[in-house]
Amino acid sequence: MSRTIKIRKGADIRLVGAAENTLKESTAGSVYAIKPTDFHGLIPKLLLKEGAEVKKGTPLFHDKHNPAIVFTSPVSGEVAEIVRGAKRKILEIRVLADTSNASEVITKPSSMSSKEEVTNSLMSSGLWPFIRQRPFSTIAKPSDTPKAIFVSTFSSAPLAPDADFVMQGQEASFKAGLSALSALSSRGKVELGVSSEGNWFNQFSADANITTYHGPHPAGNVGVQIHKTNPLNKGEVVWYCNAQDVVNIGKTLTTGELSVDRIVALVGSEVNSPAYYSTKVGSQVKTITTGNLKEGNSRIVSGDVLTGEKVNEDNFIGFYSEQITVVPEGDEPQFFLTEGWLAPGFNKFSLSKSFPTWISPKSKKFALNTNMNGEERKFVVTGQYEKVFPFDIYPVQLVKSIIVNDIDMMEKLGIYEVAPEDFALCEYACTSKINVQSIIREGLDTIMEEFK
């Protein structure tokens, strides 16, 4: 029997440009890329050189500290370029796609209930990176035994995709993916977090433990769901996976051919026709944006506006991204009486009651830009974080303990339970303009070093 949890703290940022329930095919891409930078803490070890021919599922590189975890090509073709940055850091492995669509044969597990066989198939196929862990929000370690595996089936972030629409027709693959993940969990069944506004996932009540969440963002964050149902203590590990990646796992393990399909929502006020696009992991941004953006200076974000990465049309969609958001850059001068600091703010959204729009109906949406409207200031206690942070944790005190590098205090204040995305709303609400997500990541990295 499922249970319902009400999330009271948080906020929904109502932006213009939600995707219509229309699924389109993306433009055929000629180049795909896997970016080691998408996997925090990973040190990649190349397995192929430029010019090498690959099939879909051919290993491109592996984790230096765990060679069994490989990262495979999403398409067949040849390794076109290995892009490096400062100190020869590997930024991208680009694959020039051909038309053969040749695929490596993936060894299917003889039983979905066999933990060893499922693990080996996921690692050899390159699907293991879809499974991440808390604490640290990094790729899961196959040697660990998680006390639970969570799948947040929805996102509550601004302009997030409609999970019920995205998952239509994927029932069999999703169920197979759940069976595979259940074999990896010490508790057996996977923990499914579902939205109170959807119903597609309720059909899997016999295959997973379902918890329904009602409330504002960040109700869809897996960190919130873990905290509310199975909080993490020091020394414990929880794994998690996105719903679309559960489908890819199910397809791959039942067919023996690598599946890295992705439905991406193109959203935002600067998009002519926001819609859903069928594509693959590692595709270029321009395969879904070409000819569909309004004129003007816009910012393209791989992901949502709170946690995503700034990209351009020649860049590649993030490994875990399920939406591309396009909003105004906001670098034009603002006259202080009409749009600046003395403006009445009839078109501005605020988490406080600074602008009269707080009395507007929930249906009103806003075309917001990326302008921060100020610089970083003194970090003071205002109570803003607590209003949008649904964890039973003192957020400001945790951030300060990280700033002063007090490891004991970090542990006491719950550093193991959080990830940068959980503080995205705090960062948005922060009057001091502090980069809170970066601070949380620094704290997690410090703790990771202590574990080594």
Image (cartoon, rainbow, N blue to C red):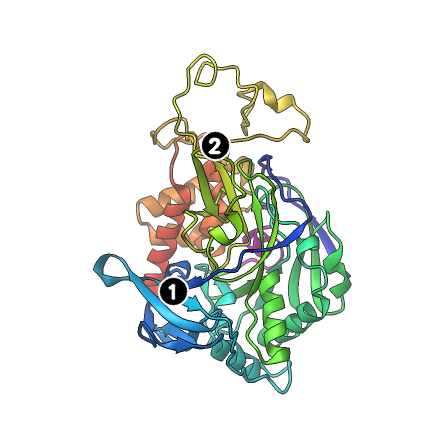
What amino acid is at disc 2? Asn
Could you tell me residue 290's position as x and y percent? 50, 47
Secondary structure of residue under mark 2: loop
The quarter of the picture where the C terminus appears is bottom left
Q: Is any atom of residue 187 visible in this view?
A: no
Instruction: Tally the numbered discs.
Output: 2
Residue bearing mark 2: 369
Q: Answer with left or right where residue 43 lies relative to residue 73.
A: left
Which residue: 33% across, 56% down?
Answer: 446
Q: Answer with left or right where residue 331 lies relative to residue 24.
A: left
Q: Is any atom of residue 59 visible in this view?
A: yes
Q: Residue furthest top?
A: 337
Choose between 70 and 194: the one closer to the eye: 70
Could you tell me residue 425's position as x and y percent? 50, 40
Q: Quarter of the image holding residue 269?
A: top right
Q: Answer with left or right where residue 344 lies relative to residue 94.
A: right
Label 2–label 1 contact, CB within 8 A: no
Which residue: 43% across, 17% down?
Answer: 341
Q: CA–CA distance between discs 2 and 1? A: 32 Å
Residue 229 colored in magenta in the image? yes
The part of the chain drawn in magenta is: 218-231
What amino acid is at disc 1? Arg
Which residue: 40% across, 42% down?
Answer: 436
Question: Which dot, 2 or 1, sits closer to the camera?
Answer: 1
The quarter of the picture where the N terminus appears is bottom right
Secondary structure of residue under mark 1: strand
Which residue: 63% across, 71% down?
Answer: 177
Check the image and report above or below for 355 versus 162: above
Residue 66 colored in magenta in the image? no
Residue bearing mark 1: 94
